[in-house]
Image (spheres, rainbow, N blue to C red):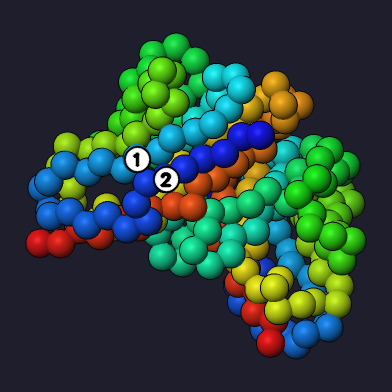
Amino acid sequence: GAGVSQTPSNKVTEKGKYVELRCDPISGHTALYWYRQSLGQGPEFLIYFQGTGAADDSGLPNDRFFAVRPEGSVSTLKIQRTERGDSAVYLCASSPRGLAVNEQFFGPGTRLTVL
Amino acid sequence: AQSVTQLGSHVSVSEGALVLLRCNYSSSVPPYLFWYVQYPNQGLQLLLKYTTGATLVKGINGFEAEFKKSETSFHLTKPSAHMSDAAEYFCAVSDPLISGGYNKLIFGAGTRLAVHP
């Protein structure tokens, strides 16, 4: 079956612009996670959705970052007034239920470059 | 707070040699432990995980890892490396008691494995 997909695969933008990154989870997965992977580092947790609601957004670095999942499936990560430090690969993952033992299935990521 | 340390950002082995990738964690309670592999331009793929029970865990592609509580370690091994094993490997922990019962993963910085003929 289809895995987690993310669009676009690459996004280049200018400092100060607004960007949206999209994640399509595996069908039927209720839990959805966003991570950010900077160069040379492991992924860092940003936000977790269970269904439509953000159950934990403690990883969002500041109020320029926002994510939604209005129908409990597709999620969009939104970044306002982008800064060069936002450049990273943004990863999305989904799992069947938001239980600690469940495997997270990762998408290929969106590489964001802020010039 | 939880943390993960992966010793060695780059490891190089010969084809057929033993692979050993080191992972140490810091956690106030026994965590759940994971190893993920990342091939170029692909998403992270789960190799294996430890939750409870047997401390020696076998995963895909011939990899295994052993949870050693006394050493706070979860090292990844494979007896004989293949060229196809060249990738980046990430160790991760999850603590459901802190994270509210869901799988918020804390990752190490990763180890890039090179396999040469």
Q: Residue at x 57, y 39 (%)?
A: B3
User: Does B109 sit left or right of A43 as displayed?
Assistant: left
Q: Which residue is mark 2?
A: B6
Type of amino acid under label 1: Arg
- Amino acid type at circle 2 is Gln
Instruction: Tell me where residue A53 sits by quadrant.
Output: top right
Residue A109 vertical position relative to residue A98 in the rendered view, above or below: below
Q: Residue at x 27, y 36 (%)?
A: B77
Q: How many marks?
A: 2
Pointer 2: residues within 10 angstroms few (<14), some, or many (20+)? many
Asked whether disc 2 touches disc 1, contact meaning CB atoms under 8 Å apart, the reply is yes
Residue at 84 percent of width and 38 percent of height = A55
Q: Residues within 10 Å of mark 1 (few under 14, many from 20)?
A: some
Q: From the image, which quarter does the C terminus of chain A lie in? A: bottom right
Q: Are marks 2 and 1 on the same chain?
A: yes
Q: Position of residue B72 (x, y in %)?
A: 44, 26
* Corner quadrant of residue A89: bottom right
Query: Pointer 2 indicates a residue of which chain?
Result: B
**Where residue B108 sits in the image (x, y, percent)?**
50, 46
Residue A84 x %, y %:
71, 79
First in sequence, mark 2 or 1: give its number: 2
Provide the residue designation for mark 1.
B22
